[in-house]
Image (tube, helix red, strand yellow):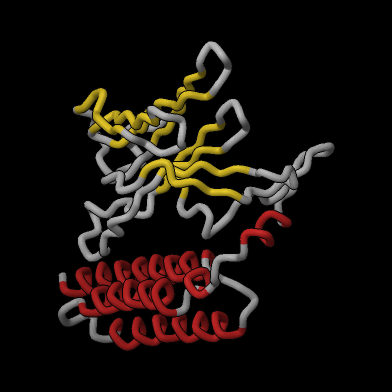
């Protein structure tokens, strides 16, 4: 009977060893680069896992500590790789102009950089009006209600109007239409108003900001919201990309 129990423990430990080795290989393959540092860490972790298994497997006939120890090694090693040695975490975001150069549009098309930080930050939605101006909703306070450690930016979030005033293909003018929209504007639709004389009179901007569908009104055509109020309320997905969009 004891021999049968020992055999079961050995088989279990072997299975756990293969699982943890495979798990380590998977985690490392996700974050693998050509850098020597990651290769060295990978080899040390695998050797450490194997040594821990062999050392504890000899004791597994007692209390079965081999499988538990090896499992802990696998989890700890995965956390170590993800948190401390991940080349993804260490890699800085590339500049906007470089990112644009890396785009590969279809033949006959061209992709150029029109606007970037700090003119617009963390955009959540956009609309284009009849004058070719691009309206952007920003979400700097995104997920703030779920991340209590994050400090709120009281002046955010904003709706901005971006313009290319000289026709060179780059936005050179930014107007803040509205700010301090909380928790986060996710939807944006612009309704322009023109008089019979063709003169621009202002607009209504509909903003998905769960739990509300908000309306911002520019009543005098100065590109500044003079009024704001909820049109509808009761929508779910508060402070989430599952909330009101469109």
Q: From the top left corner, tell me how far across and down residue 90 is, in percent.
A: 50, 75
Name above or below for residue 1 compared with residue 172.
below
Which residue is at 34% across, 85% downward? Answer: 52
Q: From the top left corner, tell me how far across and down residue 35 is, in percent.
A: 62, 80
Name above or below for residue 234 compared with residue 53.
above
Which residue is at 39% across, 32% downward? Answer: 245
Q: Which of the pair 211/172 is nearer the observer?
A: 172
Q: From the top left corner, tell me how far across and down residue 77 is, in percent.
A: 38, 77
In the orientation shown, which residue stands out farthest toward the top? Answer: 196
Q: Which of the pair 6/207 is nearer the observer?
A: 207
Assign the C terminus to one quadrant of the image.
Answer: top left
Q: From the top left corner, tell me how far across and down residue 195 is, in percent.
A: 50, 15
In the orientation shown, which residue stands out farthest toward the front? Answer: 197
> Quarter of the image holding residue 242?
top left
Q: Which of the pair 126/235 is nearer the observer?
A: 126
Q: Which of the pair 241/111 is nearer the observer?
A: 111
31 left or right of 23?
right
Which residue is at 28% across, 75% downward? Answer: 72
142 left or right of 59?
right
Q: Is residue 246 visible?
A: yes
Q: Is residue 111 visible?
A: no
Name above or below for residue 157 compared with residue 118.
above
Name above or below for residue 214 compared with residue 56.
above
Assign the N terminus to one quadrant of the image.
Answer: bottom left
Which residue is at 56% across, 29% downward? Answer: 129
Q: How many marks?
A: 0
């Amino acid at each position: 009977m004891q021999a049968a129990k020992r055999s079961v423990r050995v088989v279990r430990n072997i299975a756990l060893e293969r699982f943890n080795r495979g798990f380590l290989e998977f985690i490392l393959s996700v974050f693998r680069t050509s850098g020597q540092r990651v290769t060295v860490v990978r080899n040390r972790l695998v050797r450490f896992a194997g040594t821990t298994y062999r050392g504890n497997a000899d004791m597994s006939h007692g209390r079965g500590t081999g499988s538990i120890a090896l499992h802990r090694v696998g989890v700890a090693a995965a956390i170590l790789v993800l948190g401390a040695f991940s080349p993804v975490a260490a890699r800085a975001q590339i500049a906007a102009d470089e990112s644009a150069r890396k785009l590969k549009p279809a033949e006959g098309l061209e992709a150029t950089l029109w606007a970037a930080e700090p003119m617009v930050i963390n955009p959540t939605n956009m609309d284009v009006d009849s004058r070719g101006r691009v309206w952007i909703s920003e979400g700097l306070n995104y997920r703030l209600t779920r991340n209590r450690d994050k400090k709120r930016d009281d002046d955010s979030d904003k709706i901005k109007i971006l313009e290319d005033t000289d026709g060179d293909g780059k936005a050179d003018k930014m107007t803040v239409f509205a700010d301090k929209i909380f928790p986060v504007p996710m939807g944006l639709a612009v309704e322009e108003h023109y008089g019979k004389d063709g003169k621009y009179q202002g607009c209504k901007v509909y903003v998905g900001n769960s739990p509300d569908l908000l309306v911002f009104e520019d009543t005098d055509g100065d590109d500044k919201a003079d009024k704001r109020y909820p049109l509808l309320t009761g929508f779910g997905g508060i402070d989430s990309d599952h909330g009101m969009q469109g």
